[in-house]
């Protein structure tokens, strides 16, 4: 339904004649295009990172990748860029002085912001470069999701003696796995947060904190390097 709704709204925006374009049927229509789906998309994003089952996180991440791919194909539509440009260079000049009063402060700036965003979307590139530009955005999206997955799937822990968990409430201690005479404390939120909050041992808190900060490890360093390289490619094409 999200994709169907987006397609429908974009089709309607494209059908409007240049002389009939106004703030409401072009800029606001784009601004509020996804508003009915914001909550559910946000929930999916949270579940993709926080659900305790990896298979569920994987399912939602796959959904996010597919949604991003389809959204990029819809949003990177030169006819929409033309619609924004036509309004900016046409009827916007007539409406400019009344927009903030009629639609709220910031409405005039919203038009300027939309224009800047669409200028940075590569519509003035050659066809070959534009295709590469879009493909790069999809790559960045997939790499970003992989980056998050590596963090969420990273399992590490510290082992603590009974003396090293002094301060941790008994109900939290009862949930910890024991390895011989020591307690196993995970870097995952449900154990990390109370441990950092209550445990008296600064050394153990730091040990657990450092392990959590290193989630993703070398894999994410490589991904980050790849993302930077792809972003640099797009920036060079736009410059």
Image (cartoon, rainbow, N blue to C red):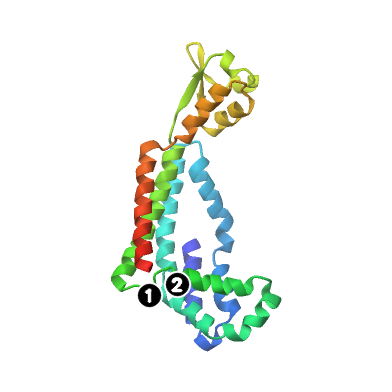
Q: How many marks?
A: 2
Q: Is residue 46 above or below residue 196?
A: below
Kindly identify the residue that appears in the image at 38 percent across and 52 percent down: 228
* Residue at the extreme right of the image, as rendered: 101
To which quarter of the image does residue 28 belong?
bottom right
Percent position (x, y) of residue 173? 59, 20
Residue at 50% x, 36% y is 52
Instruction: Single out the residue that lies furthest toward the bottom.
Output: 19
Disc 2 marks which residue?
119
The residue at 64%/70% (across/down) is 106
Mark 2–mark 1 distance (CA, rounded to whole Å): 8 Å
Above-or-below relation of 191 to 125: above
Residue drawn at (31%, 73%) of the image: 126
Can you name the residue that lies furthest to the left here?
Answer: 128
Query: Along the line of sight, which residue is nearer the eye, 151 or 70?
Result: 151
Front residue of 45/134: it is 134
Q: Are marks 2 and 1 in contact (CB under 8 Å)?
A: yes
Image location of residue 45, percent across then percent down? 51, 49
The residue where tag 1 is placed is 124
The reply to whether residue 1 is visible in this rendering is: no
Residue 100 in which image quadrant: bottom right
Residue 159, visible in the rendered structure: yes
Q: Nearer the viewer, residue 155 or 67?
A: 155
């Amino acid at each position: 339904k999200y994709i169907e709704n987006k397609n429908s709204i974009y089709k309607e925006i494209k059908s409007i004649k240049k002389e009939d374009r106004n703030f409401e049927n072009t800029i606001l229509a784009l601004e509020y295009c996804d508003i009915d789906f914001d909550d559910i998309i946000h929930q999916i994003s949270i579940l993709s990172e926080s659900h305790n089952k990896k298979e569920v996180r994987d399912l939602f991440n796959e959904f996010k990748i597919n949604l991003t791919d389809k959204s990029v194909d819809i949003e990177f539509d030169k006819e929409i860029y033309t619609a924004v440009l036509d309004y900016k260079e046409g009827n916007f000049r007539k409406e400019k002085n009344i927009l903030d009063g009629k639609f709220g402060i910031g409405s005039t700036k919203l038009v300027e912001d939309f224009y800047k965003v669409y200028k940075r979307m590569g519509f003035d590139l050659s066809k070959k470069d534009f295709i590469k530009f879009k493909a790069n955005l999809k790559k960045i999206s997939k790499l970003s999701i992989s980056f998050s997955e590596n963090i969420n799937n990273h399992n590490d822990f510290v082992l603590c003696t009974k003396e090293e968990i002094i301060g941790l409430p008994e109900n939290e201690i009862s949930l910890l796995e024991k390895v011989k005479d020591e307690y196993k404390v995970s870097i995952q939120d449900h154990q990390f947060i109370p441990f950092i909050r209550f445990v008296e041992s600064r050394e153990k808190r730091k040990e657990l904190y450092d392990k959590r900060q290193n989630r993703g490890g070398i894999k994410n360093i490589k991904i980050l390097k790849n993302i930077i390289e792809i972003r640099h490619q797009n920036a060079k094409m736009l410059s």
